[in-house]
């Protein structure tokens, strides 16, 4: 994978990006995937899973803030949060910033991702691993949602790989049916849906699946530099359509109460509200777009 000091991403067969490697820190074949962590010259430390860039120290805040703060502030009073994937701990850290959160369960299938993130990317999770509200489970997220009691979570955040390999089962009808069942009456689920300029099928197909089980399905966007190809979409499925229609002033008040206002580097109330205003080339892939 590395030649002459470069690591080349293998997400697309005919287009991509590469990183100049200062030092390779880990190269592990887990039971589920190939994991590489290296020091880059431009983006700090980088984690790669099966040849695909997952996270860099330089821009992880964009994705993590939008994946965590948007659903929690939209809900406004989330006490119980389920995180599936997100083995680097960055989403867990942001979730635990919210004063309303009493319990955050994180289910990551690959324990090697957690181990390597703790060892080589400790700043991403910070003290989240030791927070008494955190319950970190190395296990199958599909199995967990199948067994979880009805109405046991307010928000579900799915931070998975693309719907290939180990992440494929997190994009199925069965998963979304159980997600709807274990969410409370105002519950919602968000998940990464790829870069629609290059991965339109991912957004379109998962949105159609979510619409079978949730009355309000949409998406919002974040501009993550290392997720090349334009906006990254974050899929949104909620039981209450009003949660995606908050004004910036309403969001600001909730963020102030939650304790997250002024702590972010990408998320703001205005960006939160505006992220649901999709360019037509993205919006056309959502149900009911015509």
Image (cartoon, rainbow, N blue to C red):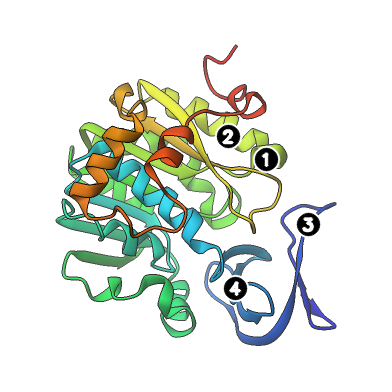
- Residue 16's disc is 3
Q: Is residue 80 visible?
A: no
The tally of labels here is: 4
Q: Secondary structure at mark 2?
A: helix
Q: In the rendering, which numbered label is found on residue 199?
A: 1
**Crowd class of label 2 (few under 14; some 14 to 19; many from 20; radius 10 Å):** many
Q: Give whichever of 162, 72 is nearer the camera.
A: 72
Which comes sooner in the sequence, label 3 or label 1?
3
Residue 123 sits in which quadrant? bottom left
Residue at image point 63% right, 63% down: 53
Mark 3 and mark 1: Cα distance apart in space = 13 Å
Q: Which residue is mark 2?
A: 203
3D distance between C-alphas at marks 4 and 3: 16 Å
Give the SS element for disc 4: strand
C-beta proximity under 8 Å, tags 2 and 1: yes
Q: Is residue 32 above or below residue 164?
A: below
In the image: residue 284, left or right of residue 1: left
Q: Which mark is residue 46?
A: 4
Identify which residue, 208 or 97, lies in the foreground: 97
In the picture, measured across the screen, residue 184 lies left or right of residue 139, that is: left
| Residue appearing at x 25%, y 60% in the figure | 96
């Amino acid at each position: 994978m590395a030649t002459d000091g470069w690591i080349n991403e293998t997400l697309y067969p005919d287009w991509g990006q590469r990183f100049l490697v200062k030092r390779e820190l880990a190269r592990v074949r887990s039971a589920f995937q190939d994991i590489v962590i290296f020091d880059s010259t431009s983006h700090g430390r980088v984690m790669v899973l099966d040849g695909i860039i997952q996270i860099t120290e330089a821009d992880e805040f964009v994705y993590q803030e939008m994946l965590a703060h948007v659903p929690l502030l939209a809900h406004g009073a989330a006490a119980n949060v389920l995180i599936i994937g997100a083995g680097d701990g960055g989403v867990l850290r942001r979730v635990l910033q919210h004063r309303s959160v009493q319990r955050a369960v994180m289910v990551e299938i690959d324990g090697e991702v957690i181990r390597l993130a703790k060892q080589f990317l400790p700043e991403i999770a910070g003290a989240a691993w030791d927070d008494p509200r955190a319950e970190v489970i190395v296990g199958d997220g599909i199995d967990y949602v199948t067994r979880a009691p009805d109405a046991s979570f307010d928000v579900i955040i799915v931070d998975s790989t693309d719907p290939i390999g180990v992440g494929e089962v997190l994009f199925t009808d069965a998963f979304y049916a159980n997600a709807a069942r274990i969410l409370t009456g105002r519950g919602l689920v968000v998940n990464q849906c790829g870069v629609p300029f290059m991965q339109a099928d991912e957004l379109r197909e998962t949105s159609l699946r979510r619409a079978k089980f949730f009355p309000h399905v949409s998406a919002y966007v974040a501009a993550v530099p290392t997720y090349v190809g334009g906006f990254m979409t974050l899929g949104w499925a909620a039981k209450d359509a009003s949660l995606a229609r908050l004004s910036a002033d309403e969001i600001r008040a909730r963020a102030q109460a939650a304790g997250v206002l002024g702590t972010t580097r990408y998320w703001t109330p205005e960006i939160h509200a505006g992220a649901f205003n999709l360019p037509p080339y993205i919006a056309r892939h959502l149900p009911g777009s015509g």
